[in-house]
Every structure is written in structure tokens, then in C-alpha cells.
Image (cartoon, rainbow, N blue to C red):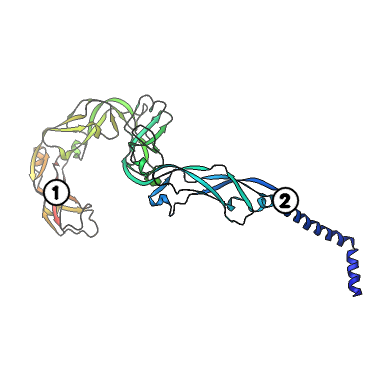
């Protein structure tokens, strides 16, 4: 007993022990004072998210969805003892809910916000919100296909001097518009729009922004295009303007006529047009408006009508819409022959397609050439090639085009088109 009393006496008269003991007691007293007598304070909790849950809600009963802005946040003012605010009050301890009980029709609705504590036991109070209401657009979902039109926006000239722009080309002709039914139903025009910031001297392809307009010309909102995952481009063709004589080229010509083709005329003989791929440093002597296949030619006058809009890489600046091409085949006669079955070959046969029989051969073939050369042409000089690449594997009998040529002749050719019928 005396030993315990001695130890206790020694501890209480030890200055270091007394200092530690005094500090612990002071901290306990300070905490008690803070908890018991801490002043009430207020603070603002920033950016508390607003809950907009339509599950089992009144809008959901009318198939109404939210379009446009659907994420909101508000600042919440709370009050409580300072130590509570610093430790327990944050955006995770407060729930702000938008009231949707009265939303039963399409349109923009003002929703009342209600804030509450996530845990009722939290010892702080909600004083107010930075916004008591939010505006939300509700409607029934709808989607519809629309034709897409190109629209070029340019503050300056679209092309440089000496060039001309053709009709813009879209990568897609239609677009699916989805969104609120009241907006989709008012769509009048849908444009794929691009901005050109300086005059062009060559063809340009650019990603477009799609916008829908109503009948009054106003841009419609809350809409999605191609479900938001498809890019549409606009190509602006640019042509260099020239005024040149017209010409034609020939193909599948026998060797005797490659450098000495038959005479021809083109009416009109001059063409004012834009041409792609050239400029002032790289121009052309004439504008080839078509290519004449020798298989189209017979003795005498051969006349072809060529639409101006069918000429590749050329943009017509004329008022007329067609050219007339006349090719004069002189010094030639015709001879009619039949291609022997042994001279018919098949190429590009798909897997699983096998020619079993030739039901119709190639007959009444018109061979054209100088009379002396025709005298030497016999059926054995004719070759027919049949391309089977488009064969229908399920068909037992089919017709195929046949390309017929003359071998061992430099001035005779086959005129017309021919076909064979085969079975598998």
C-alpha cells in the first residue's frame, strides 16, 4: 500500500507527467466547449446535382421523355454548428429532386425543386436553393427519314477567278431525324452545311453540320441526326473554265485505225465548260465529249447523241443539253457469220457455277471491214468471250453477254452486241 502511494505521489509531483496530463485535460475541455457552445453558421454547397428520374413517374405514363438539357445542378445553403458543417455537410449529403407530378403533356415545363438531407440524422438544416425551379422540355419520341440538301455558306466568292463550282455532292442523300415529335413534325428542310472561308481553286470535301429548319426558316432544336453516330460530307466540285473545240476518242479499234480513225463531226464544234484537274499552267487542246466503241460502228453514217451532263469531269456552261456526233465509216462492207462453239470461252466463273451445256450459241455476227479483207474472214477467225461473274447460282438457265472479236485482222471488227444462253 505504501508502495502504491509512493508511486502516485511521485507521478503527480513529476513536472513532465503533469504537463501531459494538463494538455489532455485541456483538449477534452476544449472539445466539450466546442460541441456544447459552437456557434451556428451557414455555408453554400456548390453544384449539387438535380435528380430527374422518370421511372414510374407521371410523364412516363404518357410516354413523355426529356429532350434538350437533362442535367442540372444548384447551390444549396445550409446552416448548423460549425464543426458539423465542416465534417458532414457536402453535395453527397443533400438530395435535390425535380417534381414531375404535374407533367402530363408535351412542351416546356417549369419543375419545382425540393431539397432534403440524405440522412435525416445529420445535424444541419437546409436554408435555401440558388434556383427554386428549372425548365425542362418533355415530348413523345419520334423518328423519320428526310431528304438531305447541301448548303454552302461563304462570305466571299466561292471559287477563284477563272473557275466555276459544280453542284455540291453529298455522301448521303437522306438522314434519320429523331427527337421530340412536335419538333420532328415541323421539319421543312434539312441541310448539310459547310463553311468556306476563302475562294476555292480545287475540289473540296468537308464534314458537314446537319441542321433542320421549319417553314419559317428557324433552326429546330432537341433533334438528333442519324442517331448521332454518322458523319456526312459535302464535296464542292471545282472546274477550270475553258472554251475549246470538241472531239471524240475511240476504243477497241483495229490496229489499222488507231492512228488513222474515221472522220467525224461534233455539233456544236466548240464547248464552253469547266474541266477538273487542269489550270492555266496545264490546259487542254480540245474537250473529248465521248468515247466511241468500234462495236457501235457500221458502214456509212453513224450518229450518236451525247448529253452534256454525261461528260465525265466536265461542267457545261452552255444552254444546249446535247451534242450530235457523226462518224463516217467509209470503204467498208459487212459479212454475217456464226461463232463456232469451240471458239466460245468462259471466264470469271463463280465457285459452284458449272456450265453444262450451250443452249444458244453466238450467231448472226456482223463483221465490218474492207471488202478484200472480209473475203479472208471465216467463222474460225471469230472468238467469243463470256463473262460469268454475275451468274445466279440458283438459276438452271441464264443469258450472258458475249464479246466477239476477230483474230488475225488489223482492219476488221465485230459490230453489235451478242449473247449466249447456257445451262448448269
Label 1: which residue?
419
Residue depicted at x 18% and y 40%: 254
Mark 1, other Cα within 10 Å: few <14 / some 14–19 / many ≥20: some
In the image, 283 versus 186, the foreground residue is 186
Mark 2, other Cα within 10 Å: few <14 / some 14–19 / many ≥20: some
Of pointers 2 and 1, the one earlier in the residue sequence: 2
Quick one: quadrant of the N terminus?
A: bottom right
Q: Position of residue 145 (x, y in %)?
A: 31, 43
Could you tell me how many numbered marks the image carries?
Answer: 2
Circle 2/circle 1 CB separation < 8 Å:
no
Q: Position of residue 424 (x, y in %)?
A: 16, 59
In the image, 59 versus 6, the foreground residue is 59
Q: Is residue 19 above or below residue 132?
A: below
Q: Is residue 24 above or below residue 182?
A: below
In the image, 160 versus 123, the foreground residue is 123
Taking the view exactly as shown, the residue that stands out farthest to the bottom is 1
Residue depicted at x 92% and y 74%: 2
Label 2: which residue?
38
Q: Is residue 381 left or right of residue 175?
A: left
Q: Secondary structure at mark 2?
A: loop
The reply to whether residue 173 is in sight is no
The reply to whether residue 355 is in sight is yes
Q: Is residue 397 above or below residue 247?
A: below
Q: Is residue 117 left or right of residue 361?
A: right
Q: Position of residue 208 (x, y in %)?
A: 39, 38
Which numbered dot is residue 305?
none
Q: Secondary structure at mark 1?
A: strand
Cα distance, mark 2 to mark 1? 103 Å
Q: Position of residue 17 (x, y in %)?
A: 86, 62
Give the number of the mark in front: 2 or 1: 2
Amino acid at each position: 500500500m505504501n508502495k502504491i502511494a509512493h508511486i502516485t505521489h511521485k507521478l503527480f509531483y513529476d513536472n513532465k507527467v503533469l504537463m501531459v496530463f494538463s494538455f489532455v485535460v485541456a483538449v477534452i475541455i476544449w472539445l466539450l466547449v466546442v460541441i456544447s457552445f459552437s456557434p451556428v453558421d451557414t455555408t453554400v454547397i456548390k453544384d449539387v446535382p438535380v435528380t430527374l428520374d422518370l421511372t414510374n413517374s407521371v410523364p412516363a405514363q404518357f410516354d413523355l421523355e426529356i429532350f434538350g438539357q437533362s442535367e442540372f445542378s444548384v447551390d444549396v445553403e445550409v446552416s448548423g454548428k460549425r464543426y458539423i458543417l465542416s465534417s458532414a455537410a457536402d453535395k453527397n449529403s443533400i438530395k435535390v429532386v425535380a417534381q414531375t407530378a404535374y407533367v402530363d403533356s408535351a412542351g416546356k415545363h417549369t419543375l419545382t425543386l425540393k431539397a432534403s438531407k440524405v440522412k435525416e440524422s445529420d445535424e444541419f438544416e437546409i436554408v435555401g436553393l440558388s434556383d427554386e425551379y428549372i425548365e425542362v422540355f418533355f415530348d413523345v419520341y419520334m423518328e423519320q427519314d428526310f431528304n438531305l440538301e447541301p448548303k454552302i455558306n461563304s462570305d466571299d466568292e466561292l471559287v477563284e477567278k477563272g473557275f466555276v463550282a459544280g453542284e455540291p455532292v453529298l455522301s448521303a442523300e437522306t438522314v434519320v431525324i429523331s427527337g421530340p415529335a412536335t419538333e420532328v413534325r415541323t421539319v421543312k428542310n434539312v441541310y448539310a452545311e459547310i463553311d468556306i472561308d476563302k475562294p476555292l481553286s480545287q475540289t473540296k470535301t468537308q464534314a458537314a453540320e446537319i441542321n433542320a429548319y421549319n417553314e419559317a426558316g428557324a433552326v429546330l432544336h432537341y433533334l438528333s441526326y442519324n442517331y448521332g453516330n454518322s458523319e456526312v460530307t459535302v464535296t464542292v466540285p471545282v472546274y477550270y473554265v475553258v472554251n475549246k473545240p470538241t472531239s471524240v476518242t475511240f476504243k477497241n479499234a483495229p490496229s489499222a485505225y488507231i492512228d488513222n480513225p474515221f472522220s467525224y463531226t461534233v455539233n456544236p464544234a466548240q464547248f464552253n465548260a469547266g474541266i477538273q484537274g487542269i489550270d492555266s499552267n496545264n490546259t487542254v487542246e480540245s474537250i473529248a465529249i465521248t468515247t466511241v466503241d468500234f462495236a457501235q460502228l457500221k458502214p456509212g453514217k453513224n450518229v450518236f447523241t451525247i448529253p452534256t451532263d454525261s461528260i465525265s469531269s466536265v461542267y457545261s456552261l452552255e444552254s444546249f443539253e446535247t451534242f450530235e456526233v457523226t462518224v463516217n465509216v467509209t470503204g467498208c462492207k459487212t459479212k454475217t457469220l456464226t461463232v463456232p462453239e469451240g471458239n466460245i470461252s468462259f471466264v470469271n466463273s463463280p465457285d459452284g457455277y458449272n456450265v453444262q451445256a450451250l443452249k444458244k450459241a453466238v450467231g448472226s455476227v456482223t463483221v465490218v471491214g474492207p471488202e478484200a479483207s472480209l473475203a479472208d474472214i471465216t467463222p474460225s477467225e471469230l472468238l467469243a468471250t463470256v463473262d460469268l461473274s454475275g451468274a445466279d447460282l440458283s438459276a438452271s438457265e441464264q443469258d450472258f453477254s458475249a464479246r466477239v472479236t476477230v483474230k488475225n485482222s488489223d482492219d476488221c471488227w465485230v459490230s453489235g452486241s451478242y449473247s449466249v444462253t447456257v445451262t448448269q
